[in-house]
Structure formats: C-alpha cells, structure tokens
Image (tube, helix red, strand yellow):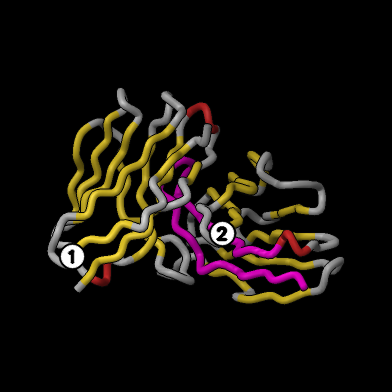
Amino acid sequence: GAGVSQTPSNKVTEKGKYVELRCDPISGHTALYWYRQSLGQGPEFLIYFQGTGAADDSGLPNDRFFAVRPEGSVSTLKIQRTERGDSAVYLCASSLTPAQEQFFGPGTRLTVL
Amino acid sequence: QKEVEQNSGPLSVPEGAIASLNCTYSDRGSQSFFWYRQYSGKSPELIMSIYSNGDKEDGRFTAQLNKASQYVSLLIRDSQPSDSATYLCAVNGPNTGNQFYFGTGTSLTVIP
C-alpha cells in the first residue's frame, strides 16, 4: 500500500505570504502528526490529530500556524504571514493508533525569502 | 534538560564492525521507544520499536532498553557503508500525552 505522501515537496515563498502544506496519511491510520525539522536537529512536534480533531496542538509555535483534518484523513498545515524563521522541512507522520510506530512522509521543504 | 539526549557524533566505524548508538531520556514514565534512520535529505525511516526492558533483535539491528537507567541503545552488527546515516531516538510515554520526543540524532559513518 501507499505510504504517507506530502505535497508540495518544495515550497519557496516570500516573507509575509500564506502557505498550505498537505499530508495524505497511510490509509486506515487514525493518528496524524506534524513535525518541523531544522538542519542538525531532530523532528520537533507541532500538532497531533486523532481522527478529525486536534488532540494536542501544544507544539504550534504561535497563532500564525494552524492545521486541519476535516474528514479524518488528509491534513493541511497552514502558515500565515510567513517569516524567514519558518524555513524548515515540515514532516508529516501517521500511525495506526496513537503512540504506536509512526511512519513519515517525504517532507515539504519550506523556504521563506 | 532535554527530553531525549543523544551524542551527536560523528561516530565512525570500519565496515564489518559493531556500531553502538546511545540515547537517554528524562521522563521516567516513558513507555515506548523507537529508532529511526535518516539519510541526508530524506525523511526518518523506522528501524525498530521497543517497549520492554531487555534486548530486541531484528536482523543486524538490536535495540536494548533499560528503564531503570532511562537508557536505550541501538547496536548495528556487521556495519555496512549503506548504514551511514543519522540515527534518531524517539520516546513516548504517559507524561507526554501522545507526543513523541526526538533526540537530535547521532551521525554514523561506516568506512569501507
């Protein structure tokens, strides 16, 4: 079966613009996680969905970041008024149930100029 | 104190040797432990999970967990150049909700 997919693979935007990053999890996986990874660092937790609801959004750095998963499958991470410091690789992972093994997508490399 | 700590390396071993990667964690209530491999420019790939004290073997990989010492390790036997990557330790437990905390990773180079 297909793994986790993410689009776009690369996104270059200008400071102040709005971006959307999409994640399509493994079919049947109820838990979906968003992470951000900077060079030389491990993935940093942003938000976790169980089904359609955001079960834990404590990792979102500020209110410019928002994520949705309206039908319990595909999720979109939305970043408003992008800043240069938002530049990173955004990773999505899914797992069959919470706290089980997570499988990562290929990531979206976001560059804010 | 970071939730999960790893020696950033780099760790270099000759081909065929055993590579030993270590990880410590701060939450004594942690219950689930994972090792991921990440090649440069790629996303993390799950290698192993371990939930109970002791050793768990899968092919050339052995994960070792010691909850009393809050320590988890990964041994790679017969190391191959293709094992050269960054290895990430991840921890999850009741006090973290369903968050996974990742270490910064250990860079491993296997020298042919």
Question: What kind of residue is marked 1?
Answer: Pro
Q: How crowded is the residue under tag 1: few (<14 C-alpha within 10 Å), some, or many (20+)?
A: some
Residue B59 appears in the figure = no
Q: How many marks?
A: 2
Which image quadrant is residue A59 in? top right
Q: Position of residue A104 (x, y in %)?
A: 48, 60
Task: Classify A63 as above or below A12.
Answer: above
Q: Residue at x 22, y 61 (%)?
A: B13
For disc 1, the chain is B
Q: How crowded is the residue under tag 2: few (<14 C-alpha within 10 Å), some, or many (20+)?
A: many
Comparing B44 with A33, the one in front is B44
**Residue hosting label 2:** A92
Position of the C terminus of chain B by quadrant: bottom left
Q: Secondary structure at mark 1?
A: strand
Q: Position of residue B59 (x, y in %)?
A: 16, 57
Q: Position of residue B35 (x, y in %)?
A: 35, 50
Does the magenta portion include A11? no
Q: Residue at x 64, y 47 (%)?
A: A47
Q: Is residue A96 left or right of residue A56?
A: left
Does the magenta portion include A109? yes
Comparing B22 with A74, the one in front is B22
Q: Is residue B94 left or right of residue A110?
A: left
Task: Classify B29 as above or below A64.
Answer: above
Distance between the alpha carbons at the discs numbered 2 and 1 = 34 Å
Q: In the image, are marks 2 and 1 on the same chain? A: no
For disc 2, the chain is A
Task: Classify B85 as above or below A29.
Answer: below
**Residue hosting label 1:** B14
Q: Position of residue B58 (x, y in %)?
A: 19, 53
Residue segment shown in magenta: A87-113
Comparing A20 with A37, the one in front is A37
Q: Residue at x 54, y 40 (%)?
A: B99
